[in-house]
Image (cartoon, grey):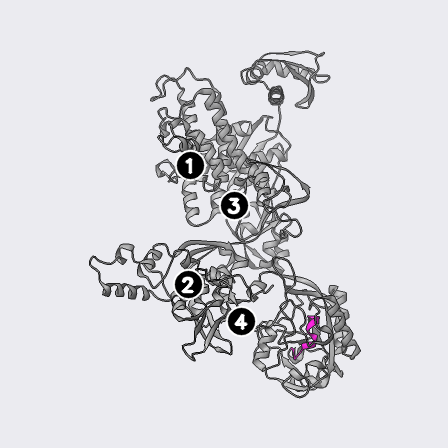
Amino acid sequence: MPFQNLQGQQDVSALPRTKLIRNFGAESITEILGNPSDCGNANAYVCGVCQRWIANFNSPSVAPPQRDLLNVDEWLLNLRFMFKSFGMPNSADATYRLANFVDLETKTTDVQSLVEVFLDELKTPNPIHRVIPCGRDFKGSPLVVAGEGTGIVHTAPGCGDVDHMIGMELDLPAIAPLGQDARFESGFGEFTGMEATSPSVADKVFDELKAKGMLFAIETYPHIYPHCWRTGDELIFRLVDEWFINMDWRDEIKEVTRAITWLPDSIQGQEREVEWLTLMRDWMISKKRFWGLALPIWVNPNDSTDFDVIGSLAELKERAVEGWDEFEGHTPHRPWIDKVKIKSLKTGAILERIEDVGNPWLDAGIVPFSTLNYNGRYPETALKWKDWFPAELVTECFPGQFRNWFYSLLSLATMMGYEEGEETREEREEPAGSNDSSSLALNSRLSSLGSQKRPFKTLLGHRLVMNEEGKPMHKSDGTAIWFEEAAEQLGVDTLRWLYLAQNPAADLRFGTRHASEPVTLQTVDGPISQTLEGAPTCKVTSTPADEVRRQVLIPLWNSYSFFVNYAILDGFDPTLGAVPVSERPEIDRWIISNLNVLIGTCRTEFENFNSPGVTQAAAEFIDNLSNWYIRRNRKRFWKAREERASDVSRGSGWDADKLAAYQTLHEVLVTLTKLLAPCIPFVTERMFQNLTASGGRKSPVDYMADSRLPLASVHLESYPEPIPALIDASLNHRMALAQRVVKMGHRLREEVNQRVRQPLAELKFACATPQDSADIAALADVIADELNVKAITSADNLDALVQYSYKPNLKTLGPKLGKLLNAVKNALPMIEAVTLTPLRRGEPVTLTIEGQPVTLAPEDIVISTERAGDWACADDAGVQIALSTHLTPELLREGMARDMIRQIQQLRKEHDLEENDRITIRWSAAQGAYNIATMIEEWRETVLSETRADRIEANPSASGKSVLIGDTEVSLSIS
């Protein structure tokens, strides 16, 4: 299948290649590289041939500067050294495909030819071998070096891209031996009909060289080489005639490129596109295929310089001298368009359409024009097009498209010759009573808009979707995941969130298709066991998708379910008179404040095409909603209402605190459905319809049957806007500080192996600023409840309870300090703690080490805390805490009571008891019964109340579930 150079650069891989090394006399390089004696005592030099099948068609060889050349003896010595050091005789990047060349002054001498059948194709009477300087690439680096292979590389102008450029520059013979099927054409002796990449061709080449005494060595090495991105087959260069667009106007395209916003910044899309435009050659627009966009080029079969390009069907009909009747009524595709012949305006000769079709990217590049029915010859059409042009956003895979679709869009938009204008539609409209002259003026105004035109305002490039091991997925090896498999097993909203949350600059390691595990998928249309393409449906697993469900979708749905279950139980009506936000508890005001912050963040990030910013902020909010707001407010929903509401407009009969909790959670959930509808449309639609159903609106399904009531769909709602008056920045900061302290406390509990159910006596804290200390003190009851401590006390500092350890971060300090690193490492333990205190606040410090000033940033030092007596300590950016770990008998008994409550609640779940079901608790313990009995006597009322039990009794003969209460094994049962 024909491939363009653009497509061939999409995928390259290191192929195991057997390279032959041929020899030739030293006199061949004397005139270009100097006297052979300058390079050592050798009478022969060797040349590397990367592609075995083109050894027959070598014209010149390319050598590095004199100082890099190795003679045979030196090369063999170097070969042994590299085998020992690297395991292979050349570097991993063992490719000799040249990118550029300069100053190709050449010298020639006679040298032995391999295949004498080609003598008649050479332009000189004798077989000639040239050795030319390798030149340098656009960065100034030599293109061939002696450190790889032999230091001399062959070229074959008829069998390689860069080789062909060198051949054209030096007027070298270009032998093109291959047909369209990559086989040798007739006239090439024993090679005729053989496939170029067949191992048998390589064997024959080796045998020929060996027979002629020209084979010096054979080695296997990794050759970086392009391959077909669909099949993985190796690509072969074949010399053919094609049609090109001259790209001398690349500087204009660069200016258009620079007028576009390229996202994300880390991909460096604009820089890479500009570099591509700088280095690219003329654009090949033809393809030797049957299907495709017929190029409107008619050429004289006897004179390729006599051709015309037709601009429209009307022009073609006007100029047709043959075949129009056969073509009329058909689309302009082969074979019908090929019937039409025209007469040359220059010579009068009959012109025929070329057989080639257009490059698909040529067609794709006019999308901004063709999809909007643009035609510059008709002003009305052009003006309608201007209302939509340019596109706000284009998104595609950046590695694969910056040479293809992005390039063609930019090139053709620049070529079309229109620049984005600032005129409004009203300003462009013709005044009443317009005449032909005003139409001409309109045409003139459109033409004067300029030549540099961006086809889109923003480009969002993204990386690739791989399997979970980071490898490409292919249908051919069964690793490709079909949509039906992923949609049914992982969930479509899960997939949407997964893609939106992915950093576009990194490959998405999607998941794994288990081809050996077929499954039957249960769909809304019934069970299916194969895809639409006929492939068997197989098991699909995805760790990233599992994380989306675990961290986002399940917590969101659980929050929604919690509200719905209790709202049904209590008969909550969302149309009840709302409790003013200012009168609601602080935690309600906090979640509403955070919700409005989230609204602002989502709007900003969506407008900036930053979907990961949206999903990250939303995931953090959902975590706060589920694991902080709802968890801390469960008892507000549990407490009984005084009576049923009688005046729904005022909310009479509802406890104000409980009503505020319901209304707050309802408002948050409804707003969340609107915010996240673009990300998870099905989940949010389901939630929205249920949450708003009591408003008298109908679902889309019901609406189809009866349209008298308003349609209820989250996707028809206006996107939320933040209400600044509801954002309380100080409250947000205060609660964030409390959450930070709680996380630090939980981390300390884990370190000292103390479960949260075990009460502790005290937590001390100290802050870098008085305001932070005041904020934490204001929420001391919240922190105490979360960490299960009896007292929260503040202090100026906790240095008496905390021991700090300061160690250098070698990753950052190593490159920065060099030889001073060890001196700093030795000095840190000797420096007074107060000197290094700013580092704990996130501030740098400057020290004098061996007479030199050394500035240490917070990231340069690893700070850790150590226990001091009965206190566990932690420090986080200006906040210190110390947690008492001393346990009194009273604290131990309370911890045991909490353990018992938890175990009984678990038994209620296992017995599927309803919330109002009453129980009797029975317990027994073989050892430690006294401790359990003492605890029950002290905490009986609490245990009975929390577990909704009527009584608790010891029953040594009763069998039950064996559980741990504190450190005591207890048998528990309920009835």
Q: CA distance from mark 1 to mark 4?
A: 54 Å
Q: Which residue is mark 2?
A: 413
**Amino acid under label 4?**
Glu
Q: Quadrant of residue 755?
A: top right
Q: Crowding near pointer 3: few (<14 within 10 Å), some, many (20+)?
A: some
Q: Which residue is mark 3?
A: 501
Q: Earlier in the sequence, mark 2 or mark 3?
A: 2
Q: Earlier in the sequence, mark 3 or mark 1?
A: 3
Disc nearer the start of the sequence (1/4): 4
Question: Looking at the rendering, which quadrant does residue 589 occupy?
Answer: top left
Instruction: Answer whether residue 53 is magenta in the image.
Output: yes
Task: Determine the secondary structure under disc 4.
Answer: loop
Residue topped by disc 1: 714
Three-letter code for the amino acid on which mark 3 is drawn: Ala
Dot 1 lies on which element? helix
Q: Residues within 10 Å of mark 4 (few under 14, many from 20)?
A: few
